[in-house]
Image: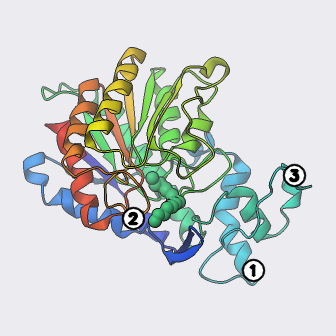
Amino acid sequence: MKVIYSEECAKHAPKYEILSGNLVDYFESPVRIEIIKSHLQSFSSSHNYTFHESTDYGIDAILAVHDSDFVQYLKTAYDEWCQEGGDKNGILPEAFPHKNMPSFGRNSGAATAIAKAGHYCYDLSCCIMGGTWLAAYASAQVTISAAKALMEDCSLPNENGPIGVFALCRPPGHHATNNLCGGYCFLNNVAIVARLIISATSKKVAILDIDYHHGNGTQAIFYSTSNPIYVSLHGHPDYPWFSGHASETGEGEGEGYTVNVPLTTETDDKKYLEALRSVIQKIIAYEADFLVVSLGVDTFMHDPIAGFNMTSGVYIEIGKHIKSIGKPTLFVLEGGYHLETIGINVGNILEGFNS
Ligand code: SP5
Ligand code: ZN
């Protein structure tokens, strides 16, 4: 199995975030992907993992999902902030334009770097520092490179079931919308490659989001389209708080092509697998040609910011269930913050898929 990565992904490394009102060390840290990479490397002979540095395919696929003013903001926010005398640790919003404020919906209200931060970001987890754009761009390029590898390799014979490629990337993507960052996410990697695969092949794509959190950004981007279908299992009620209800099913041409399965906190292996089996039936019925998995392992019982009760062993079963869909599969890393187990848990999903 090909694993795509980039050293550039480490360049976004904020010191702190504000979590539930407390200043805490940044959970979405660069060591996450180092740990996963060394875990997979320790298995690479038996499981046939090969490691490939990403290629830079340029900005076009990113601009097919994200507004150009938002991309410009991500590129320039830190420099503007520094020119205005801001702290070298980076920029976080100070106020958000809520719907009863006069400048709501008007970019003209965002004159300074910190006002723009409130305009383009919806929480306090997306500090922008000197390397943030480089890392977010690299994360998207890792995912694009992985998608290209999958499209090339999926026509090759593979006696061991469907082919898979793993995009070992960070920062993650599924909370980012066309014009907002949040939830550690700046560019929506999965949305970028779903749209890329559709435009390159004219085929159908299914997105299966198994991160603990609802992928509000991915849902929003594809809410009005029937391709891709977006399917999410997530803890509820929990972050991002204002999306992920079962009643959100898409609109217009997209009606019925968003599927949300909110699960109560304390969900365990058995309940999770039951829910997964039911959504897999929906994905099979959709008859997708490609599967893109938003792969988070923050569903693990000891994850520091989430609430499920799942064990490491269940990830092998999850991988086998994903394999049973039988389609070329792109795994894209999202969340997972329990550093002691992030390697084994991600490795177990891939092992289940490759078994
Ligand atoms: C990609 C991804 O997994 N992003 C998640 C961002 C979550 N940020 C807010 C987490 C809120 C946690 N609140 C409960 C803390 C319990 N100790
Ligand atoms: Zn998550």
Point out which mark residue 304 bears: 2
The residue depicted at 62 percent of the width and 76 percent of the height is 90
How much space separates mark 2 and mark 1, taking CA atoms?
Answer: 36 Å
Point out which mark residue 202 bears: none
Q: Nearer the viewer, residue 51 or 245?
A: 245
Does the numbered disc 2 mark a residue whose Cβ is under 8 Å from ligand 1? yes
Q: Is residue 155 visible?
A: no
The picture quadrant where one finds residue 292 is top left
Q: Quadrant of the N terminus?
A: top left
Choose the circle earlier in sequence order: 3 or 2.
3
Is residue 143 found left or right of 176 in the rendered image?
A: left
Residue 355, image x and y in percent?
13, 37
Is residue 12 found left or right of 167 in the rendered image?
A: right
Q: Secondary structure at mark 1?
A: helix
Q: Look at discs 3 and 1 and give the one toward the viewer.
A: 3
Q: Nearer the viewer, residue 40 or 102?
A: 102
Residue 241 vertical placement versus 290 (above, below) = below
Q: Is residue 302 visible?
A: yes
Is residue 345 found left or right of 205 in the rendered image?
A: left
Residue, disc 1: 83
Residue, disc 3: 100
